[in-house]
Structure formats: C-alpha cells, structure tokens
Image (tube, helix red, strand yellow):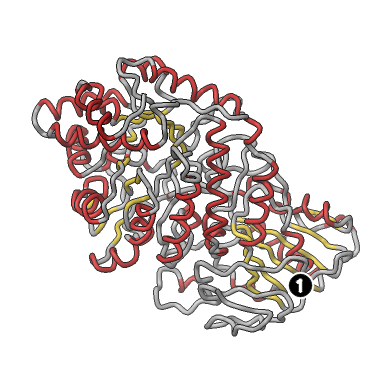
Amino acid sequence: MSAGGGRIEALVGSMTLSEKIGQMTQASNEVISPAEVADHAIGSVLSGGNGNPSPNTAAVWADMVAGFTEAAAQTRLGVPLVYGIDAVHGHSNVGGATIFPHNIGLGAIDDADLMRRIGRATAAEMMATGVRWTFAPTVAVPHDIRWGRTYEGYGRDPALVARLGSALVDGLHGDGAGALDVLACPKHFVGDGGTTWGTVSAPEWNHWWDPWGDGWRIDQGDTRLDEAELRAVHLPPYESTVAAGALSIMASYSSWNGDKLHGHRYLLTDVLKGEVGFPGFVVSDWMGIDQLDADYDHCVIEAINAGIDMVMVPDEFRRFIDAATRAVAAGAIAMDRIDDAVRRILRAKSALGLFNEPQTRPALSVVGHEDHRRLAAEAARRSAVLLKNNGALPVGGNEPIDLAGAAADDIGLQCGGWTVGWQGGTGATTPGTTLLGALRAASSEVAHDPDGLFGGRPPGRVGVVCIAEEPYAEGPGDSAVPTATALDREVFHRMRQRCEHLILMIYSGRPLVIPDLVSSADAVVAAWLPGTEATQLPGLLTGDQPFEGRLPQPWPAGESDLGNPDAVPSYPVNHGLRLGIHADSAATTRPPTVSNEQSES
C-alpha cells in the first residue's frame, strides 16, 4: 500500500497505542527475534557496532534483515520496518564491503561530487543486504583533536561540514527519480564537536557506560558555549542537511551548558523542528535516554516530551514499551506527542517506498564491487596531505624502497574504527589492498620488514615508514595526547639511521603530536584512515599522481596546542604541498605561498 499524507493520517488514526509505541521502538538484532517484532509491531531494528551475523557475509546479512522485515509485514496493519546500521564509511559492518576513507580524509578533499558518488555506492551496497537506514553522516565540527570521534567529522570549518554532509545525504538518497534509496541520519544534534575535555562523568546508575576505565574524557561531554556560538558553529550543518532532505536526525549524548541533549526540548523541538523546519523524526543514540535520570520512567517521559520520536533502546525494548504505556495512561505524555512522533516516522518510511516494497534484494555482487573499490581508491589517494617534502619525493619508478612498519600491510590499521566491528581491529579484518600490496603491484623493488630490521639487507637510499594509531571508536579513543606508539617510534628511528631519504606515512584519525618525527623525516604524508583501497597511493610517491589533500584540522606543534584555541600549529588548516617543492623542514606559522606547484584550498 502507498502512504501519502492522507494515508499516513488514516493509518495513525487506526493504530492502537501499543502499535504506536511499537513504531517508536528500535531494538537490537542481538536481543529481539522476528516473532517479537511481529508481536510488538516494532518500528525498527538495528545492528550496533558489533551486531554482525555469523558468518559475516552479505548473503547472511540479507537473510537476517529479511527475517525481520517479513515479520513486520505480518502485523495487523503491515506497517513496514526500517533496518538501521552505522554505515559511516561504506557499508562498514559487512565483511567484504567497500570501505571508504573516514570523513576527516574526505574533508581534506572537499569535493561535493565525490561525496555524492560515495553516498550512492554506499547506498547500493546497503540495499543489496536489505538495510535502508544509515546513522550517517556525522556533521560534528570537531574543535579538539583529543576527541575519539575527530575522524568522523569532516573538519574544523562549519561551511565545509555543511557542504560535504549535505552532499552525502544527497548521494545516499539517490537520484531523486523516486523513492529514497537509503535514509540518511545526520548526527549528533547538536554541538558534540565542541565539548570540553574532562567534563564527562558516567551516571552512577548507568554502569554499562565506561567499561574501559580511562575512556570517555571528552566524548559525551559538555559543550560550554553561548547560544550565538552554538548556532554559528554547530547548527549550520543541520540546516544544510535538512535542506538536502534529511528525514532522520540522531540526538547527541553530549550536553549544552550542563543540560543533556536527549532531554533538551528547546533545541530538539523549538530549534530543530520549529525554526529549522525539520519534518522528519529524531532518534536517540544507543541507550541515550538512560542518562537523563535514575528513574527510567522519568527518562522516557523527559526524552519523548523533549522531541525524541524513536528510542534506540536497544536491549530492553519491553521496558521502554511498558514505561511509555504507563506514561501515556498517566497523562505524563500527551497522545498528540505520540501521534506526532509516529507520523514523522511513517513519513520517512513512506519516502523510502517501504509501504510499496518493504524489502529490496538486488544482486549481492554489488557488495564490494570493483567500481566501488576504484572509487574508494580515488578517494584514498586524493585525501592524502603532503605536509613536508625535503627532496625525498618523488621516488623514481625503479628506485628500490625499504618499507617498514606493521601498518604498511594491515587492512585493520588502514581502516580504523567502525570497520567490521565497533572498535575496528588489526590484521586482515576484511578484503582489500594494503600499501605493501599496492607498492609491490607497481614495482618489484620493494622490501618490507615491519620492524625495520631487514635481516642483513644492505641499507637503501629510500625508506618509507608507515605508522598508525591503534583502531578506536567514540570515547575509548579519547586521548590526552594523540601520538605515535612506542613501537612505531622505535621503527622510525631505526629507519632514520638506515636510509638517506626517509618518508613518513601516517594512518590516523586526527593530527598527531609527533613534532620530533616530523622534524626528522624528509617527507611526511598524512594519509588519515584511507579504507580498504590503497591501490593509488604509490602514484603519489612516484609523482605520477598529484597530492590534492589540504588539512581540514590544524597539525599541532606540540602538546601545548591541545585544547588551546590560540595555539600556533606546525601546519594550519588548508596546508598541503604539491610535489616538486622542497619545503623547509622547520615549523611554519601560516599557509604556504600559492604557486604553480604548491597551493592552498
């Protein structure tokens, strides 16, 4: 059945309270069964960061999602279910999917058309598994690189974030010819990129929240800004993505001047739904409403009255349903508020065409398709920023290269967090091409030793050291000093003694505090977290491909830069060299001069 405006109103009018609250409920695939979806008329199921089926293949994903979708079709009214996932750099939980660079790398490119193409490729791979909703893009404006989600943001400039975020929404939605391909979900509303270090404390009643002990020091913290600055810096990306047609937005765990966003009626309802004119629905983050109060019933009342329309429970969906039912019966939540939430959810489902076609099953061969991998390779190559070059680049095509560092042959380190699992992993976590594989495909004159020892091989003229942050996501990635690992430092110094020209390639989700390594290296490349496809990176080293990337975040001169808005960085936003320039190795205080060979953007 179709569901235009009139049909949605009729449907809302025919639903029982139980069915309406079911539509407002999102449960995890790990705790709910298809039969329970049917019993409770559940509106959405999600796979969290680790909610993968076993075995983790596209075919098994498609069958799992279909089971939930078909169950929803058997309910009294047959209201379709929408399945959600964090496809934040490709369909990134699925084994064998194409993994694109994380957003910080895409911000270094600043190409809206590329973002649309990435969105369309991601949507195609999602639809092949039946998944029609991604919790993306992150349109935070990160202002402190100690934040473990820095790589999820495109950069420091709100206009850049607005441009690229709205372009990805456009790409995910499709060509505009009919129903949306995939429902985008800009996040996290609002101000999560502006939180203050050290303002995070786990609620005493919420013991699941900080199992890492020393994690979460700025993620989920307090954004301490006046309203004018919040509106000027952090609101524009939402205005842009709503204008692009976004019909779902995720609320932030963070607070604004001490008040949690999940309970912030002024920002969620008055500003987002009222002033900005957002017509879609607001979804909570994972157990996000639980942080509002020790009394769970109060959490439900406060969140829904503030403007949360769908609640990501995710584990105790029955508890949410019971609490919401009690709240309506007691008059603590008005039926008009319930109807408004359900209407907004159904409007988005209608835009997806789910009432006509609840389940998409295109060919599974689209997952990890070679065309998508070529697009990912293009994005990885274009995102790399040449920070420094003192005559080490370009490397001659037949020049022997000594390649060191474990990251040079590790897909997990190359992809970072939110890849096949929430925190990511190391090793061959998913198919792809590493830097070593790409170099060997381009030249036979490559020797690799992760430790830089090379077993008696004579020292080479040219060495490349590839270092990486250990993968992380969210609060566990909060770091007082983001820097190189001790092992990577050992390998670097070993190679510095070995090679006449040393090139440092960095895989990281943010600029790192490594002034000693940058100073000692002859060339430095910030490759960010490039994803599964490193096939075009060798062309940057040989000069066959130009460096295009420009810094979307300032590169710190030292630890004193961290959290200091007045710091003078080693390399400012928009810094990036072209090949052919022998840049001075000393720290610079302003962008390099524009010339035919070296430019800013």
Residue 365 percent across, percent down from the top left: 66, 32
> Which residue is at 40% across, 61% downward?
141
> Which residue is at 42% across, 61% downward?
142
Q: Give the residue type that dot 1 points to.
A: Leu
Q: What is the secondary structure assignment of the residue under circle 1? A: loop
> Which residue is at 48% across, 52% downward?
168
Q: Provide the residue designation for mark 1.
A: 393
Q: Which of the two residues, 178 or 102, is positioned nearer the viewer here?
A: 178
Residue at the left extreme, as displayed: 331
The answer to whether 529 is drawn above or below residue 212 in the figure is: below
Q: Left or right? Give the position of 533 relative to 71.
A: right
The answer to whether 519 is drawn above or below residue 57 in the figure is: below
Residue 21 percent across, percent down from the top left: 24, 27
Quadrant in which the N terminus appears: top left
The answer to whether 75 is drawn above or below residue 216 in the figure is: above
Q: Left or right? Give the position of 269 relative to 90.
A: left
Q: Which of the two residues, 81 or 153, is positioned nearer the viewer here?
A: 81
Q: Which of the two residues, 276 or 305, is positioned nearer the viewer here?
A: 276
Q: Quadrant of residue 585?
A: bottom right
Question: Callout 1: few (<14), some (14-19), or many (20+) C-alpha neighbours within 10 Å?
Answer: many
Quadrant in which the C terminus appears: bottom right
Count numbered badges in the picture.
Answer: 1
Residue 260 percent across, percent down from the top left: 25, 50
Q: Which of the two residues, 518 or 126, is positioned nearer the viewer here?
A: 126
> Which residue is at 62% across, 43% downward?
98
Residue 502 percent across, percent down from the top left: 76, 70
